[in-house]
Amino acid sequence: MDRALFAAATGMAAQQQNLETIADNLANADVSGFKGSAETFAALAAPDRRAVGTIALGTHPVFTQGKLERGNGAFDMAIDGEGFFELARGHERAYTRDGAFSRTADGRLRNAEGWSLHGVRIPVDALKVRVTDDGSVRVTTSKGTRVVAHLRLALIPAPERMQSIGGTIFRVTPQSGRALLVAPGHGDGPRIRFGMLERSNVTIIDAMMQILTAQRAYEANAKGVQAADEMLRIANNLQRG
């Protein structure tokens, strides 16, 4: 009886955590570059190797590409393919798929969280800026057009093992591996799409279906708890009788 009660209770706890993750995904479905997370579960085994419950192993981001749409910002850009923008804040480095940048007074391209696009600075006399598919940052001034930087993209060996540090920004870990900077626009590799933004890879319909599935699993486990509790009550009454 206790084993059945424990199995159902751990199942309820796991589905509750799953629902919280799905709800967070749904809340960020309209955030540019946001990547939804998925819960990982495993069977909790007794010493005799029989499954006695469910244990949550944690969440991991899912880096499928979102839809590319025309952005409204003058410095919006998206990655078509794998890879990340490398961000800098002092000596720190981080990575994102969110290409919503704006120019600061010192010419840096900065996102809403205060991170700058690494290796790029726009001259103060720039009248027009464009980033080509191969990462060349071209600026037009009163003296003509020239390339001021070559944007590189970061490839991560195991991106699902990166650590989220808030919103759409991630940091590499020993498990994810170090970032490899590559030039975009070659062969089948990633390309820069200037003037575009990558939408979240979370769709409302999929998230709602996941919520329904998790709720049904939670309810099934709740009925298991009720059944186990009733059987324990009957067993106690029999012993008293």
Image: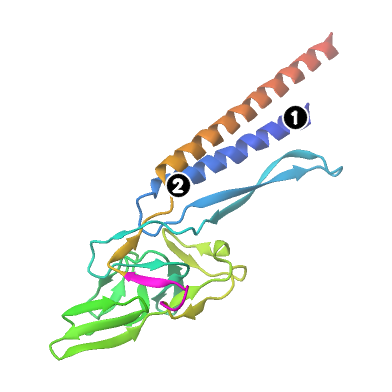
Magenta portion: prevailing SS class: loop
Asked whether 32 or 206 is in front, the reply is 206
Span colored in magenta: 185-193
Instruction: Residue type at mark 2: give it.
Output: Asp
Dot 1 crowding, Cα within 10 Å, few <14, some 14–19, many 20+: some
Q: Residue furthest left?
A: 142
Whole-number angstrom distance, CA of label 1 to CA of label 2 = 31 Å
Up-down relation of residue 137 to residue 200 (above or below): below
Asked whether 230 or 184 is in front, the reply is 184
Q: Which mark is residue 4?
A: 1
Whether residue 124 is visible? no
Q: Give the residue at mark 2.
A: 24
Q: Residue at x 39, y 46 (%)?
A: 27
Q: Position of residue 65 (x, y in %)?
A: 45, 59
Q: Quadrant of residue 79?
A: bottom left
- Colour theme: rainbow
Query: The residue tagged with tag 1: helix, strand or loop?
Result: helix
Q: Position of residue 119 (x, y in %)?
A: 37, 82
Q: Residue furthest right?
A: 48
Whether residue 74 is visible? yes
Instruction: Residue type at mark 1: give it.
Output: Ala
The N terminus: image quadrant: top right
Magenta stretch holds residue 187:
yes
Q: Residue at x 22, y 85 (%)?
A: 123
Dot 2 crowding, Cα within 10 Å, few <14, some 14–19, many 20+: few
Q: Position of residue 158 (x, y in %)?
A: 58, 67
Q: Which mark is residue 20?
A: none
Q: Quadrant of residue 16?
A: top right
Query: The residue tagged with tag 2: helix, strand or loop?
Result: helix
Sequence-earlier tag: 1 or 2: 1
